């Protein structure tokens, strides 16, 4: 019989998060020697080397170790779910760790944090806001249950659920000539000063949109915050191109009005989706949170937005312009 404890699996599952054994030990509140002994015990049980421990080069997991850490993470998560669910079939209990892409977090997180705990008071939501790269890394490391991101440039190996439709829109100063129009053609803005939201996947979206029409934008400024794009537009310094967001007010942070117009023909039509690793099963709490997000936000967006499967095994990283 293999003598391996759940605590040993918990410790090893956490190792991919840290560059050195000492850093891992400090975070896990265990001595470095005790952590080293736990790893050695696992290696003896497995019969293979799981990691390389060098003081000069830090901690490196072997290919077997990487797979072992991933599978250990699954076992630990399923064990926690078993304990949480025992005798509590009628009410959800425990945490759900939600990641959200930074550009639309202020438009969706408040609604979820306000309404979901009222429906499921036994569930606590932990929020991480970050870039695509940060959220994907956290999902792979098991630090998040699910993340809300744009369905653009996603790597393979993720399941996904559509939350709401989104598309690129023009943000204009109220006195801009096109502000009086119901819709805008991208070609009408090509020669205007453009305030670029300098973040992925937004840059790729805009570049592809102009290229597809044989156009090139006249960039007046590059900024890394949406509120700054809107502030500059509100002062009449140029126009902005931003993905549509629920609960968004047509106003800059300085209280200046902004006119938001859809494109005709549409540009960069996509969706915000909830994603999680294909080899991980959603917890009942995370699944309930996605259900709630669809209920509250799913009706947002134009009805003719391009569809994606409600849940699919993999996202292939399509680039919708």
Image: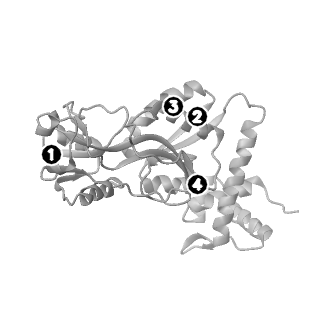
Which residue in the rendered view is the most extreme toward the right?
1
Q: Could you say which disc has been placed on residue 225 in the image?
A: none
Above or below, 25 relative to 194: below
Q: Nearer the viewer, residue 208 or 234?
A: 208
Above or below, 247 relative to 126: above
The label nearer to you, 1 versus 2, is 1
Name the residue carrying label 2. Answer: 124
Which residue in the rendered view is the most extreme toward the top?
118
User: Residues under labels 2 and 4: Cα distance?
Assistant: 27 Å
The label nearer to you, 2 versus 4, is 4
- Badge 1, how many Cα within 10 Å: few under 14, some, many 20+? many
Instruction: Assign a secondary structure to mark 3.
Output: helix
User: Residues under labels 1 and 2: Cα distance?
Assistant: 42 Å
Going by the image, does 239 lie left or right of 293? left
User: Residues under labels 4 and 3: Cα distance?
Assistant: 22 Å
x, y (%) of residue 42?
75, 65
Q: Quarter holding the N terminus?
A: bottom right
- Badge 2, how many Cα within 10 Å: few under 14, some, many 20+? some
Instruction: First in sequence, mark 1 or 3: give its number.
Output: 1
Instruction: Say whether marks 2 and 4 touch (CB < 8 Å).
Output: no
Instruction: First in sequence, mark 1 or 2: give its number.
Output: 2
Instruction: First in sequence, mark 2 or 3: give its number.
Output: 2
Q: Could you say which disc has been placed on residue 313 in the image?
A: 4
The label nearer to you, 1 versus 3, is 3
Q: Nearer the viewer, residue 37 or 127?
A: 127
Residue 100 can be seen, yes or no: no
The label nearer to you, 2 versus 3, is 3
Name the residue carrying label 1. Answer: 238
User: Residues under labels 1 and 3: Cα distance?
Assistant: 36 Å
User: Residues under labels 1 and 4: Cα distance?
Assistant: 41 Å
Residue 241 can be seen, yes or no: yes
Name the residue carrying label 3. Answer: 295
């Amino acid at each position: 019989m293999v003598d391996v404890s759940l605590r040993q699996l918990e410790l090893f599952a956490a190792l991919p998060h840290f560059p050195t054994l000492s850093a891992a030990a400090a975070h896990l509140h265990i001595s470095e020697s005790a952590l080293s002994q736990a790893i050695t015990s696992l290696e003896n049980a497995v019969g293979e080397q799981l990691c390389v421990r060098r003081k000069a080069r830090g901690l490196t997991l072997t290919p077997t170790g990487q797979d072992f850490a991933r599978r250990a993470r699954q076992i630990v998560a399923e064990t926690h779910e078993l304990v949480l669910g025992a005798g509590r079939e009628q009410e959800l209990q425990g945490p759900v760790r939600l990641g959200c892409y930074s550009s639309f977090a202020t438009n969706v997180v408040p609604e979820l944090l306000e309404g979901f705990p009222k429906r499921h008071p036994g569930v606590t939501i932990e929020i991480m806001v970050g870039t695509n790269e940060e959220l994907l890394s956290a999902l792979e490391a098991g630090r998040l249950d699910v993340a809300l991101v744009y369905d653009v440039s996603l790597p393979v190996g993720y399941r996904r659920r559509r939350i709401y439709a989104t598309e690129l829109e023009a943000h204009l100063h109220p006195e801009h000539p096109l502000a009086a129009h119901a819709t805008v053609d991208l070609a009408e803005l090509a020669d205007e000063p453009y305030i670029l939201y300098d973040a992925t996947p937004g840059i790729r979206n805009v570049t592809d949109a102009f290229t597809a029409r044989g156009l090139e934008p006249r960039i007046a400024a590059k900024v890394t915050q949406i509120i700054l794009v809107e502030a500059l537009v509100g002062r009449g310094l140029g126009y902005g191109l931003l993905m549509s967001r629920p609960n968004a007010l047509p106003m800059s942070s300085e209280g200046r009005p902004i006119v938001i117009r859809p494109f005709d023909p549409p540009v960069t039509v996509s969706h915000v989706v909830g994603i999680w690793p294909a080899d991980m099963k959603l917890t009942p709490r995370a699944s309930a949170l996605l259900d709630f997000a669809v209920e509250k936000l799913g009706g947002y967006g134009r009805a003719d937005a391009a569809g994606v499967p409600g849940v699919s095994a993999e996202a292939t990283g399509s680039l919708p312009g």
